[in-house]
Amino acid sequence: MVAEHPKISFVIPLYNESEIFTELISRLRKLIDRITDPCEIIFIDDGSKDNTALLMQELAYADKKYHCIFLSRNFGHQFAVSAGLEFAMGEYIMVLDGDLQDPPELFFEFYKKLSEGYDVVYGIRKKRKEGVLKRATYYLFYRILKSISAYSIPLDSGDFAMITKRVAKIIVKMPEQSRFLRGMRSWVGFKQIGIEYERDARGAGDSKYSFRQLLKLGSDGVFNFSTFPIKFFTILGVCCMMSSVIYFLYTLYRKMFYNDVPVGFPALLFVIILFGGIQLLSIGVIGEYVQRIFSQVKNRPLYLISKRVVNGKDVADE
Ligand code: UDP
Ligand code: MG
């Protein structure tokens, strides 16, 4: 169904996906035929070097449901999705990968949850049909991130999700440069729920995430959502200082009761460990300030209000 004011938007980033484009369109068409509400599909071309952009453009000229955004160069998946969210007009916005790893047909389950009053429904990958190494790395990463992150980021959930317009608006307004959308999405709060699904293997082509990009995504997740790394230095510094003092007392004891301590060496070791500790602690202290500057600069809203009751009536804040 075509409409000026779509109720549902699909946001799909594409980077060199010409191999799978036809299959993607046929799956989407089949899905949209089953949806009674007006839909729009937003494709974001993230600076593709193959003819993805051309294919997208042809489709958008032929069918008004397709809305294309062409980025000026390759900015990366997270930025492509952010651009899509900015222009999505639907009340409900589904974000999915263009390689058909996230089954679009899950729309109906997601939509059901949103109609029940949820603001965010995200996919939880139950099974991944990817290499052992990649699966193991992801498994570990999400568990480490969960254990050190300041607030809970759900395990094994990626960017595959359906969100309401108000959540999308908030994410778009968050001006942070290093974007870890799945974390930002869970930071927003409101009513969120995960739905388990089996992550398919890529429909065609290879992963467009280079190892470097994956590393960057991982570190954005850790450094944007956790202060553990900097706290770790403080803890290490304190441990070093304490162990230097214990070592000092121990050598003093050996000197007094056994007199078997070599001249000079323990003093040297004591000073080295003590100053190592002081330096680590200083890095930790500076880090605490840097971390505070960082969170100030990120300029996230202080809080988000889901609803207020004034004069006996519900007031929804935008
Ligand atoms: N993608 C993108 N820009 C990039 C890398 C990937 O827009 O720089 C898109 C890609 O076309 C796909 C989605 O992001 O639709 C997920 O990428 P990919 O499948 O390569 O990641 P993986 O599933 O291997 O983590
Ligand atoms: Mg993929």
Image: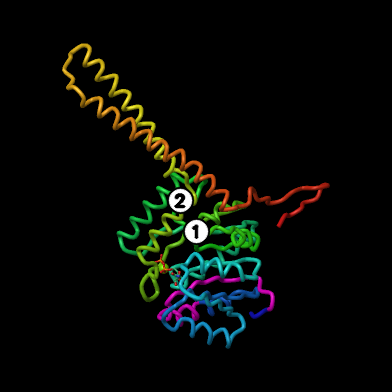
Q: Is residue 210 above or below residue 143?
A: below
Residue 32 numbered mark, or none: none
| Residue drawn where x is 55% and y is 66% of the image | 82
- Number of marks in the rendered image: 2
Nearer-the-camera pick, 110 or 161: 161
Q: Residues within 10 Å of mark 1 (few under 14, many from 20)?
A: some
Residue 32 image point, x, y percent: 57, 76
Q: Is residue 161 above or below residue 291?
A: below
What amino acid is found at the position of numbered circle 2 in the picture? Phe
Quarter assignment of residue 133: bottom left
Q: Residues within 10 Å of mark 2 (few under 14, many from 20)?
A: some
Q: State which region is magenta.
A: 4-27
What amino acid is found at the position of numbered circle 1 in the picture? Ser
Where is ligand 2, by quadrant?
Answer: bottom left
| Residue drawn where x is 63% and y is 48% of the image | 302
The secondary structure type at the circle numbered 1 is: loop
| Residue drawn where x is 56% and y is 67% of the image | 94
Name the image quarter holding the C terminus.
bottom right
Residue 178 numbered mark, or none: 1
Magenta highlight on residue 10: yes
Quarter assignment of residue 84: bottom right
Magenta highlight on residue 11: yes
Residue 223 numbered mark, or none: 2
Label 2–label 1 contact, CB within 8 A: yes
**Mark 1 within 8 Å of ligand 1, using the beta carbon:** no
The secondary structure type at the circle numbered 2 is: helix
Q: Is residue 248 above or below residue 303?
A: above
Mark 2 or mark 1: whose residue is earlier in sequence:
1
Quarter assignment of residue 267: top left
Name the image quarter holding the N terminus.
bottom right
- On the rendered structure, is 197 left or right of 4? left
Residue 195 image point, x, y percent: 51, 58
